[in-house]
Image (cartoon, rainbow, N blue to C red):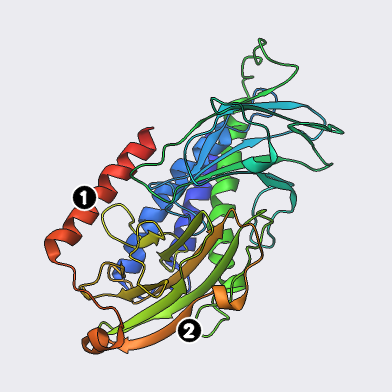
């Protein structure tokens, strides 16, 4: 049967979900099966998008195909490459806070992070007065808006990052191989579908195993209920620093994260589940950017991570997740960050929170509901834009 390799992979994938080391409850398992559904959808899409001669950008992750502690503030796109061919990327710059490009020498796997062969943001390219740009990638290329493809180049990743969901707008993006424009790919051979189903199965298993291993490398060996100093994000992003940690909180306790409001164009915090996925950021406030958050008069942003509503604007909802991950990102930086730019963490009994927040101001339920409504509308606009 043509689909047999993929069917076998589905059975193996279900075992991976059921036996994941963090599964302790029915909720954990139910979320795992939702994660599996999104991964199945993504794996089929990626297998059919593996086209290096007539490439196109696909959305790498989204609200229903999550992976790798996806950033709620980012749109991720990628296209496959050959290291011996020339490619042209054209587009129009949107109004988002950051637009970055990265060439990788492979994909993420359970044993390694792919090497970054080139990484830059749009400050390194020439963009005309209407926002249009053209970038060329190829072996040995040099000059304005030209970037050399090193041996082993296999994937181009593009990230478009929002600080203000309501007002910033995405741009446009297209890729073609320079010597194939106007041509067309050959018709699929009789054996092509079987190969693609087999590839989809391999992608699915690798995807699940990889992002169950990631937290062991970067998070779970850290002391619980702490956050690291800002550090360059592993994987070679050109202008990104991050601070990471994991939490384990009773319902009567809150984690207060205090961090300076940065002058970086993008600064954001998010929570993630033990599946290493963003929590529901559409219908709950599980992430905030510095533009969305309230900054106190002393220039600090104080986030409150808790299960119960603390009545503050910068509440990050746990949504029933006693354990999970926390990540702060800074992007489009013009300087390296220091420990003083990073977060401080304090555990506080929830009923003592008003006394422990120096600028505590209660937010009414109707106001908070309006914030959620704005998130829902903004994500819908962004994903269709």
Q: Is residue 353 above or below residue 149?
A: below
Q: Which residue is mark 1?
A: 373
Q: Residue at x 65, y 42 (%)?
A: 123
Asked if residue 1 can be seen in this view, the reply is: no
Asked if residue 362 can be seen in this view, the reply is: yes
Measured from the top left, where is residue 50 in percent x and y?
62, 33
Is 87 displayed left or right of 296 in the figure?
A: right
Measured from the top left, where is residue 338 in percent x and y?
62, 74
Q: What is the C-alpha distance between the residues marked 1 and 2?
A: 33 Å
Label 1 crowd (10 A; few <14 / some 14-19 / many >=20): some
| Kind of element beneath mark 1 | helix
Residue 14, by quadrant, is bottom left
47 or 161, which is in the foreground? 161
Is 118 displayed left or right of 335 in the figure?
A: right
Question: Which quarter of the rendered picture does the C terminus lie within?
Answer: top left
237 or 133, which is in the foreground? 133
Label 2 crowd (10 A; few <14 / some 14-19 / many >=20): some
164 or 321, which is in the foreground? 164
The first of marks 1 and 2 along the sequence is 2
Q: Residue at x 68, y 58 (%)?
A: 113
Is 24 displayed left or right of 362 in the figure?
A: right
Q: Which residue is mark 2?
A: 224
Q: Residue furthest right?
A: 140
Measured from the top left, where is residue 255 in percent x and y?
36, 81
Measured from the top left, where is residue 377 in percent x and y?
26, 43
């Amino acid at each position: 049967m043509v689909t047999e390799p993929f069917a076998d992979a589905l059975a193996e994938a279900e075992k991976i979900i059921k036996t994941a080391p963090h599964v302790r409850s029915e909720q954990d398992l139910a979320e795992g099966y939702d994660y599996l559904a999104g991964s199945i959808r993504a794996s089929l899409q990626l297998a059919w998008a593996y086209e290096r001669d007539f490439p196109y950008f696909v959305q790498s992750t989204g609200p229903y195909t999550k992976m790798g502690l996806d950033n709620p503030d980012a749109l991720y796109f990628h296209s496959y490459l050959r290291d011996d061919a020339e490619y042209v990327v054209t587009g129009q710059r949107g109004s988002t806070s950051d637009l970055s490009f990265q060439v990788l020498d492979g994909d993420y796997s359970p044993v390694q992070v792919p090497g970054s062969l080139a990484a830059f943001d749009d400050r390194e390219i020439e963009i005309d007065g209407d926002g249009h740009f053209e970038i060329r990638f190829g072996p040995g290329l040099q000059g304005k808006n030209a970037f050399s493809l090193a041996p082993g180049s296999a994937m181009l990743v593009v990230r478009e990052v929002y600080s203000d969901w309501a007002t910033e707008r995405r741009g446009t993006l297209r890729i073609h191989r320079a010597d194939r424009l106007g041509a067309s790919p050959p018709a699929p051979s009789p054996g092509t579908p079987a190969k693609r189903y087999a590839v989809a199965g391999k992608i699915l298993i690798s995807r699940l195993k990889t992002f169950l291993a990631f937290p062991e490398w970067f998070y779970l060996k850290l002391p619980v209920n702490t956050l690291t100093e800002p550090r360059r994000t592993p994987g070679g992003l050109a202008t990104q620093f991050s601070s990471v940690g994991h939490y384990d909180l009773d319902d009567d306790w809150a984690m207060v994260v205090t961090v300076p409001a940065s002058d970086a164009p993008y600064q954001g915090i998010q929570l993630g589940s033990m599946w290493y996925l963003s929590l529901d950021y559409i219908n709950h406030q599980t992430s905030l950017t510095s533009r969305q958050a309230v900054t106190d008069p002393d220039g600090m942003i104080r986030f409150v991570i808790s299960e119960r509503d603390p009545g503050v604007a910068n509440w990050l909802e746990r949504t029933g997740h006693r354990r999970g991950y926390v990540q702060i990102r800074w992007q489009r930086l013009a300087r390296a960050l220091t420990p003083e730019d990073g977060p401080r963490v304090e555990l506080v009994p929830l009923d003592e929170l008003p006394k422990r927040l120096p600028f505590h101001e209660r937010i009414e339920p109707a106001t908070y509901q309006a914030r959620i409504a704005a998130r829902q509308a903004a994500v819908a606009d962004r994903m269709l834009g």
